[in-house]
């Protein structure tokens, strides 16, 4: 569901704004696990989430002026909430195999997305050509099979707040890939923002551990 909401929102919201809204995932996770009694509140996790969010905002500060329609912004933010709570839900449940859990979640998401699409009266058209199928197959392989398999495995080893803190690194990786593949030149604000993101993630993952 989070991918569907993100796709819907990004049709009208800049990628920078969407990245910042998604950077709230670690903070949402901290609030959720505390309220549900899954983990005690740790100040360094809250501080790490806030620092990381500030870093992402700085990385994409040049794209914030446009904003977006309230419905599109809400779709992206609800998608972020769904992404955060999905990891929390997996942690709350009994230990289970990653692959069946991923398959079941995907099947339920497919049914819900199809029902919403029908209710909205959307036309169903299959993609045509490699240019259309390529991104879809990439998302299936990396965004679903690999990413969610790793997520499920990490949740058996780490605290859910630590796992979701890793989502802050995604915008930084995107900037690095842009520089490496498209010869983009990050500005000083982007570099400083990336440093803040890494500081926030490091604070969550490493500081205070024994």
Image (cartoon, helix red, strand yellow):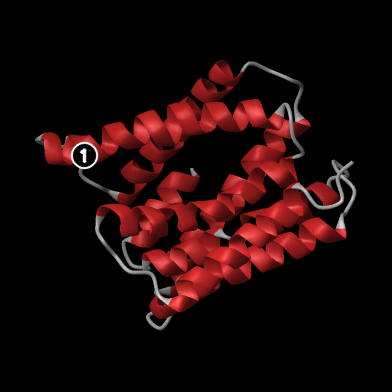
Look at the image and tell me in which quarter the C terminus lies.
Answer: top right
Measured as percent of width and height from the top left, residue 130 is found at: 12, 35
Image-quadrant location for residue 197? bottom right
Q: Residues within 10 Å of mark 1 (few under 14, many from 20)?
A: few
Measured as percent of width and height from the top left, residue 125 is found at: 17, 39
**Horizontal side, residue 187 vs residue 100: left or right:** left
Can residue 28 be seen? no
Can you say whether 17 is above or below 11 in the image? below
Q: Residue furthest bottom?
A: 65
Measured as percent of width and height from the top left, residue 87 is found at: 65, 39
- Residues 147 and 4: in front is 147
- Residues 85 and 112: in front is 85
Can you say whether 15 is above or below 160 in the image? below
Image-quadrant location for residue 55? bottom right
At 74% from the left and 20% from the top, the residue drawn is 95
At 38% from the left and 70% from the top, the residue drawn is 186
- Residues 33 and 78: in front is 33
Q: How many marks?
A: 1
Measured as percent of width and height from the top left, residue 30 is found at: 76, 53
At 10% from the left and 36% from the top, the residue drawn is 128
> What element does badge 1 sit on?
loop
The residue under label 1 is 124
Can you say whether 56 is above or below 6 in the image? below
Q: Residue furthest left?
A: 129
Can residue 179 be seen? yes
- Residues 90 and 160: in front is 160
């Amino acid at each position: 569901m989070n991918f569907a909401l993100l796709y819907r929102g990004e049709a009208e919201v800049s990628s920078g704004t969407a990245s910042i809204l998604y950077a709230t995932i670690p903070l949402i996770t901290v609030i959720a696990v505390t309220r549900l009694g899954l983990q005690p509140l740790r100040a360094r996790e809250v501080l790490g989430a806030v620092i990381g969010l500030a870093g992402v905002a700085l990385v994409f500060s040049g794209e914030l002026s446009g904003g977006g329609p309230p419905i599109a912004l809400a779709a992206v933010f609800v998608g972020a909430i769904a992404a955060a709570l999905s990891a929390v839900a997996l942690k709350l449940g009994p230990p289970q195999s990653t692959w069946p859990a991923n398959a079941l979640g995907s099947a339920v998401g497919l049914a819900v997305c199809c029902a919403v699409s029908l209710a909205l009266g959307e036309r169903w058209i299959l993609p045509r050509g490699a240019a259309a199928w390529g991104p879809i197959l990439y998302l299936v392989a990396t965004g679903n099979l690999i990413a969610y398999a790793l997520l499920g495995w990490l949740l058996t080893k780490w605290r859910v707040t630590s796992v979701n803190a890793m989502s802050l690194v995604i915008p930084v990786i995107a900037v690095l890939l842009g520089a490496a593949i498209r010869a983009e030149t990050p500005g000083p604000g982007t570099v400083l923002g990336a440093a803040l993101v890494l500081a926030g993630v490091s604070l969550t993952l490493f500081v205070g551990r024994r």
